[in-house]
Amino acid sequence: MKYGHFDNAKREYVIDRVDLPVSWTNYIGVEDMCAVMNHTAGGYVFYKSPQYHRITRFRPNGVPMDGPGHYVYISDAEDGDYWSVSWQPVGKPLDEARYTCRHGLSYSVYECDYKGISASQRLLVPLGDAVELWDVRVKNNSDRTRSLDVFSYCEFSFHHIDMDNQNFQMSLYASGSSYAEGVIEYDLFYEEFGYQYFTANFEPDGYDCVRDRFIGNYHTEANPAAVEKRSCSSSTEKGGNHCAALQKKLTLAPGEEARLIFLLGEGRRADGQRMREKYADPAAVDAAADALAAYWNAKLTKLQIATPNENMNTMLNTWNLYQAEINVMFSRFASFIEVGGRTGLGYRDTAQDAMCVPHSNPKKCRERIEQLLHGLVSKGYGLHLFDPAWFEPETEEKPFASPTVVPVPDAASRIHGLKDTCSDDALWLIPSIMEYVRETGDEAFLNRVIGYADGGEGTVYEHMKRILDFSAEQIGAHGVCKGLRADWNDCLNLGGGESALVSFLHVWALEHFLEAARCMDAADDIEKYEAMYGRVKHVCETELWDGDWFIRGFTKSGRKIGTHTDQEGKIHLESNAWAVLSGAATYEQGIKALDSVDRYLYTPYGIMLNGPSYTVPDEEVGFVTRVYPGVKENGSIFSHPNPWVWAAECRLGRGDRAMKFYDALCPARQNDMIEIRESEPYSYCQFIMGRDHTAFGRARHPFMTGSGGWAYFSATRYILGIRPQLDELLIDPCIPAEWDGFTATREWRGAVYHIEVRNPDHVMKGVRSLQLDGALADYIPPCAAGTEHTVVVVMG
Ligand code: NOJ
């Protein structure tokens, strides 16, 4: 069953049926202000921090589904009927009213058609301005003049997620609203920078700032009293719950259309006046929308592809990069799942996210890498969750000390010890640094000096060495890296036990680092880290092979995890993917290991994390054994590690298999099975219920997941094989044998390469010849910025 379709020309997903089983979300805003909105305009907007500066209120995980939101109501004077431009909150029967939602890149449009009136509400946040624009059109398609009242509505929040849910004895009496000259000003009296405004490009005919006056007692957002009686009550108050309701009376002749712009912004009334003038003319709103489209276009055109796989084209050309970028922008902490309870950066997530976008967002990629380098303790491990602001000079002048100050731990308690260290966190940073350098050619970055979290400083290159040394020291009885609090898998809590995944990651990180060492001509380091590479690889070969696959590790008491004699958790995805991807496995081991993954873990919706799921708690293995079977880390199709297997299959040269696994997880391919998938088909979800769960195939937690970045990374760099190196653009595809080839346009270091890959012999891997601008070439060097080139790759 499907609910919508991809409009690739407009880069939009169109929801044709809005009665979805769950919210399908979008991210409106790419800078400091961002709204997370669903298909019925439910959601919230925040400024800089979803935890500490939530502007509009959201009642997460509630009934009715995902509200309130940023709503527009229309009321008809003819018969007193009213409806909302987005299907909810009024929820008119869908056989009487036609509703659609179009999610585009950083904007959403809600459309309705009811009783001869068509209306739309477009939400966007312009580049450079902290204001959400509600661009509303109302058109009379009937043959008689219509008198309509249009109302905006959103509910203000007490900013701090905690204050919004507790301690009402304080917050309820510290928030106030006022109205003057067409602008509502909301103010959280006890807080620095506590002001927001709501205004419009017209003179309102009415307003309400007090929520309960607009909604009315014993009413809800579905039937606000003010809309029912078509009249606001000019309410404002010091104290209480507040909203932004502006009313406009319209008289529309047949065929006539009105366009109204509402503005919800950060700042005081004067800021509102300024923005009101700036966006008074709808042409300014259109220009802001064009600028946003150009912003995304500049990113997306860095790589565009045309392959025989339409779903892959849709994902890679638009949605997959969009998701990956959003993860880097907001670092995982704003969604309907992450509703603002955390601030800052998760070390491993941020490191991996940054690795996937150096071509489309080199600035943010570098900024994230620098923040993580600053969050590295001089012993070589990363602070698992930290706020980069701890290490930045205070820039904002605070007018007074608020009673709700954001808690800042003192310097000593920021640095956690080994007990709280995750063994994989900092290892991810080394490949990210190298991907940034390969993309940009900015080798000088390796010499940049950056402070350690606990004091002292070192170059980026020195930071990398400390990370590798830490993993070399933190080994257990078998010489394999210790699992510590957890490795990539939050729920595998091995303590002094050992993690195969981390040793494989160590091999991978060493391979990346050695390229840096060679590039710096650091003879001593080359010798030292080549020896380390050899040692770790040897341990992997001798300790971790199980006969048909690689084990996942050892418990503290020395028991193997994920071995053939296990009844539960017999085989795990992560260690097998990384054994191959890191290059630690031999070719024969790799083939056997990934065949076992296919045999035991593959499903039509992707690859499960482990199988069979655990049902018996085992404290030595960790919390994973207490998670319900088939859910999250216990035997679900955890999306993030799936692309590791695609890349691993490509390392083995099996393009058919890589594509089989790619297709299984591909959200766009599941567009027609929403009765099973439920979640949006334009974003990878954190996990899909596994075989051992009754809801097998149901996807959960969209957008904020490492699979966004990794799916893009593995598909573009390994399946399509377009991989920048320090001094060449490598093209080494691993594709299904049936493909005749594909084309791609890739911008690298300012030059544009029009790439045609031909596959006349229908192989899966191997390049027979390469041409650059019509001449045979051994490799593609970085060409001058601003130039364009043709590249022909013949496989065979
Ligand atoms: C989600 C966490 O954000 C991520 O860091 C972790 O790797 C996965 N869960 C798997 O446990």
Image (spheres, rainbow, N blue to C red):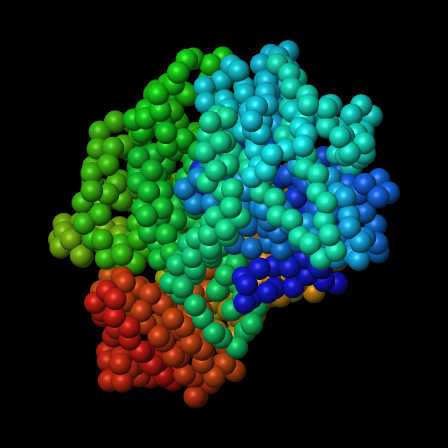
In which quarter of the view is residue 381 placed?
A: top left
Q: Residue furthest bottom?
A: 760
Which residue occupies the foreground of this view, 263 or 24?
263
The answer to whether residue 402 is left or right of residue 13 is left
Which residue does the image show at 41% across and 72% down from the upper left?
A: 744
Q: How many marks?
A: 0
Res. 737 visible in picture: yes
Q: Residue furthest right?
A: 79
Task: Give coordinates of residue 214: x percent, y percent.
Answer: 73, 27
Which residue occupies the foreground of this view, 627 or 219?
219
The answer to whether residue 378 is left or right of residue 558 is left
Task: Give coordinates of residue 52: x percent, y percent.
Answer: 50, 27
Instruction: Please say if 307 is above or below 88.
Output: below
Instruction: Please say if 793 is above or below 302.
Output: below
If the image is split into quadrants, where does the N terminus sit? bottom right
Res. 549 visible in picture: no
In which quarter of the view is residue 300 placed?
A: bottom left
If the image is split into quadrants, where does the C terminus sit? bottom left
The answer to whether residue 681 is left or right of residue 359 is right
In which quarter of the view is residue 652 placed?
A: bottom left
Which residue occupies the foreground of this view, 225 or 790?
225
Task: Give coordinates of residue 116: x percent, y percent.
Answer: 78, 55
Which residue does the image show at 80% across and 57% down from the upper left?
A: 143
Which residue does the image show at 33% across and 42% down from the upper left?
A: 367
The answer to whether residue 685 is left or right of residue 755 is right
Which residue occupies the foreground of this view, 509 or 121?
121
Task: Give coordinates of residue 94: x percent, y percent.
Answer: 81, 53
Which residue does the image show at 62% across and 55% down from the upper left?
A: 102
